[in-house]
Image: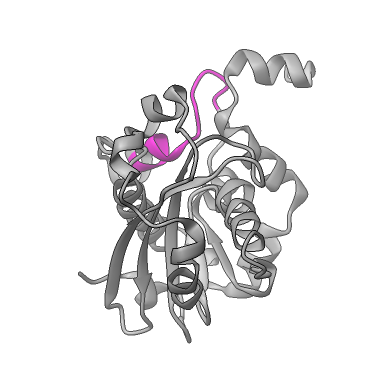
Amino acid sequence: MHSLIPQLLPLDRPLIVFDLETTGLSAGEDKIIELAYEKIMPDGSVVAQVHRINPGRPIPPEASAINGITDADVAESPSFAKLSYTLWTAFEGADVGGFNITGFDLPFLKAEFATVGKSFDYLSKRILDAKILYHKMEKRDMFAPRNLSAAYKLYCDKSHTSAHTGAGDVRATVEVLEEELRRYPEFRNWQYLAELHGNKDLLDSAKTEHASYEDTVNRANTLF
């Protein structure tokens, strides 16, 4: 496996593009049940990995309905504590990428590492969030979601048939990032990317992924 990202954005250390599947949406309360990643090396080579994790509690049916992971699927899997050294080693010395990782995956992973006494300081890493770039460049259609499936269709002209599977979401995200970097040369600069990932309006916009159209209107009440 090979990625085009290093040809478009200079990498002086690995970029780990990852995705979490969880028991719910609350970092610090809910648990990770799957972590998938593609670790892109500066030469473009890729190391892919999927870890199933036993949360130590029943997986809510509503979570299983989204990600397809049941209690039986993780019954023999290690706990996060047992897997934590492996995961820490994978992320150590690497920058991070994904889709909506600033709003969800990074805070969630930080909370899980805190349970084993480790401070996952992701703000010290360079961040490449495909959703932030998507929201920066594409105008919002209030009747359509701006989620990974929509981005995959827009940028890659493909249907995301493996949505909410860790490996499927990571592969789609890498393809989206490659196309965003190819289409918009301004994204090929880490300093500019850091400015975007610190932009409050973009960060707030990215948080609306899981909200329905009606919920968004009811909360803001100033959208029209």
Q: Position of residue 114 (x, y in %)?
A: 67, 62
Residue 120 magenta-highlighted? no
**Can you tell which quarter of the image residue 125 is in?**
bottom right
User: Which image quadrant: the N terminus?
Assistant: bottom left
Name the colouring of the figure: one colour
- Residue 5: in sight, yes or no? yes
Residue at 50%, 67% (x, y): give it: 84
Let me know if residue 69 appears in the view: no
The x and y percentages for residue 54 are: 42, 48
In which quadrant will I find the C terminus? top right
Could you tell me how many numbered marks the image carries?
A: 0
Instruction: Look at 56% across and 30% down and name the residue there.
Output: 210
Q: Nearer the viewer, residue 170 or 134?
A: 170
Query: Is residue 151 shown in magenta?
Result: yes
Q: Considering depth in this image, is 190 or 168 the residue closer to the camera?
A: 168
* Position in image of residue 151 (x %, y %): 41, 41
- Magenta region: 141-152
Residue drawn at x 43%, y 58% is: 18
Q: Residue 40, image x and y in percent?
A: 36, 73
